Amino acid sequence: MKRTVLVALGMLILAAESLAGVEWGLSAGAGLFLQRQKEVGDVYPAAFPVGVQVWSGWKNVLLSVGFEYLSESGQAVPLDGGGEEFPLRLRVSSVPITLHYRVWLKDVFLMLGGGADYFQYEERWEDLDIVAEGKKWGPVISFLAGYRFSSRWSAYGGIRYEPMPTGKSSLLVEEVKLGGLKLTAGVSFSL
Amino acid sequence: MKPFRPLAILFFALFVFSFPRPVALVKIMKGTPGLIGLLKASQTEVLQELETCYLARADRDERSSLRKHGLSVSVLDRDSRVKEYVLVRLSSPERMRSVSRLGRVLAVEGSLHLFWTDGGDPMAALPPGIERKPLPRSTILPFLRPSAYPPGAALRPAANDIIASFVGEVSQANLRASVQSLQSFQTRYTSTVNCEGAGQFILDYFRSLGLEAGFQPFTFGAGTATRNVVADSRGRTDPDEVIIICAHYDSFSDMPEVLAPGADDDASGVAAVMEAGRILADQPHDFTIRFIAFSAEEWGLYGSQFYSEGARANGERIIGVLNLDMIAYTSDMSEDLDIVVNDFSRWLADRAELVAATYTGLPVRKVVDASFVYSDHSPFWDRGYSAFCGIEDADVSNPYYHTTADTVDTLNFDFFEDATGTALAALSDLAQPVRPGYPRTPAGLAAESETYVSVFQAIKNVRLTWQAVSDAAGYNVYRSDFSRAGFTKINGSPLSAGVFIDRALPADHPYFYVVTAVSSAGREGNFSREVESPPEPTRYDQTALGGEIFRAIRGWGRP
């Protein structure tokens, strides 16, 4: 995963420098899943992913590459009334690569984008030696709105659809999707 | 006319599609991994398991679906609706020709053929004396289970003096007297008065031993009435657990209504069952021993069919069925006893082989052949019970077979005694004699399963409970991945109470358990009855559990 991030960052910087008049920047934010598979939510009730992005823009088009991380604690669900507790830990790290189209309305901007998300997950039964893990690509669609409150700083918020389909089934659900519709907010800094 | 044309086409199409689709009788070859799971998933109407294939009913769509899963499916009869089929063994061209004149005959596997008629009852059309088995009318799919039993996993029975003493009690004189008595009925061909008289003789014998005995009446064919004879020696620990030893008391010959002595076929088997009853009637065992003499075997296994259907419907817990059919004729002294089993019952043959080596020294030849369907063990296979057929030769070698010359003077009583001793030892070994000086066997072992799921995986806790034993200082719990064999102890020091939780097991894997009681002197008693952890947990039903606040937030816009 680290290697993937470094390669992506390098490519972005090279691409940005090779273009005249490009702007580039950094942003950081956090999120909250508004809608997810209900079964996943039953096991992991609270999900607050955090992330950083490097972005580069040319005119109204921006390309962003990010790194996001989610660590959730949960409990195994008893199917037939059992009373024992089995704590779980889900860790998901992802590298979303998104192409945005940006529109300015004075200091307010709107961005619509889409791309792909390479994610890696690990679910661990904390008291037992049981681990499930995998890596997969998934789609990303995002809609952001922001406000530029200085020449370099802006704040943004929006929603992102990032289903993270794992292609795996379990007793809980036919196909496990770790993601969903996510509310995001953060700040951005133009270099 | 033109406006009516589309309507006419529509009606024509409806007319054509309203015809019921033909359901073919098909042969599905074995060899595909996970085949039973595939058949269960597709709800295939399986009627018969054979050694290399299954016989099933399937329409065109079902056949296509099975083929898409890589199964080899061939059609035996294009339209199987309202037809009945009989499996027949046609080992000679003459017999083949004679049966071909009576209906349709199709080779299925080796000498095994399928016989049916375009109208009427194929069983009635077949001449008597041909080994036959009607295909079950209802599916056997619910009872099919893959055998996870690996070779050589049979429990090696520790030599038990009690069982050895039972074997020592087998009497050639008694065996001879019983065969002679049965032969003296002249014929025991089902439908004759003599056959019913033989049934009464067997019942009276069992009752004289103090066994709980009775008739099980039934009718077959065109309303012929007859009776199985059933006798019980009730188990002391778990009487609902049953081991059956059985044979058929009806006989056949080339003049069956008048003379069919049937000494080897199958007075020998019945005599062995009677001798086992005599020796074990007063001997306490953990589990119930059931002695059965079936009727109408020669007509098409009707007695055992009737019994096994009822047993499955009533949820009888039958550990194993030891069917003895022709166990007293040998062509030479180096004869062995063939134990024929299907794949699911291999453990039973291995157990019999070990028992024979321990107690009688009789060589046993294990024959795994699900196509050996012509005796009373076969209906038990169809209902998912473990069963074997003990027979002197799976390929019949008795020249007097089904003739009026099948008499007591043609039998080898040394072999007969050893075969009876082997069956008796296997019976007692499975039923477990109560041993003085050892703690009693824990009764009422039960297993409950609690399944816990995460997003990706599921585990289960298996909670075992059993009744306390007064003379026990502790208990041991044993677990196996397969039924009836391969148990290993999973607790450390002996447990003090009748409860144990086996934690965090893979939820989709079945496990089998037994427990034992241990005395203060460290003597370990018999295995309890076996229980299985529920193998397939229910899928998550999306009941609301936790995370109410976040679910409320997430709820909006949810499709």
Image (spheres, helix red, strand yellow):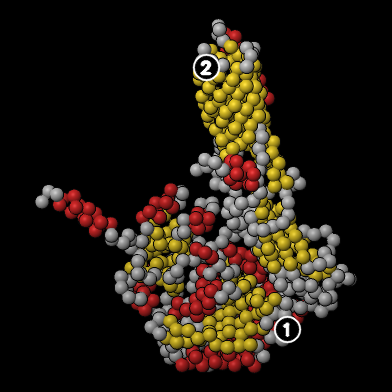
Number of numbered discs on residues? 2
Tell me which residue sits at (53%, 74%) in the image. Answer: B313
Residue B396, percent from left and from top:
51, 73
Q: Residues within 10 Å of mark 2 (few under 14, many from 20)?
A: some
The percent coordinates of residue B24 (x first, y second) are 36, 61
Chain letter for the residue marked with disc 2 in the picture: A
**Which residue is pictured at 37% across the width and 58% down the height?**
B59
Q: Tell me if I can see residue B430 in this picture.
A: yes
Q: Quadrant of residue A183?
A: top right
The amino acid type, in three-letter code, at marker 2 is Trp
Where residue A140 appears, as percent x and y from the top left, is 54, 29
Badge number at residue A104 = 2
Residue B283 image label:
1
Q: Is residue B28 left or right of residue B231?
A: left
Q: Residue at x 65, y 88 (%)?
A: B211
* In-front residue for pair A126/B57: A126
Element class at badge 2: strand
* Label pair 2/1, CB-CB below 8 angstroms: no
Residue B421: tell me if it is visible. Answer: no
Q: Residues within 10 Å of mark 1 (few under 14, many from 20)?
A: some
Vertical position of residue A157 compared to residue B349: above or below: above
Task: Name the residue nearer the viewer: B99 or B56.
Answer: B56
Q: What residue occupies the far right of the structure in this picture?
A: B521
Callout 1 amino acid = Gln
Label 2 vs label 1, nearer the camera:
2
A104 vs B223: above or below: above
Residue B398 image point, x, y percent: 51, 77
Residue nearest the viewer, comparing B418 with B228: B228
Q: Chain of mark 1?
A: B
Q: Residue at x 57, y 47 (%)?
A: A173
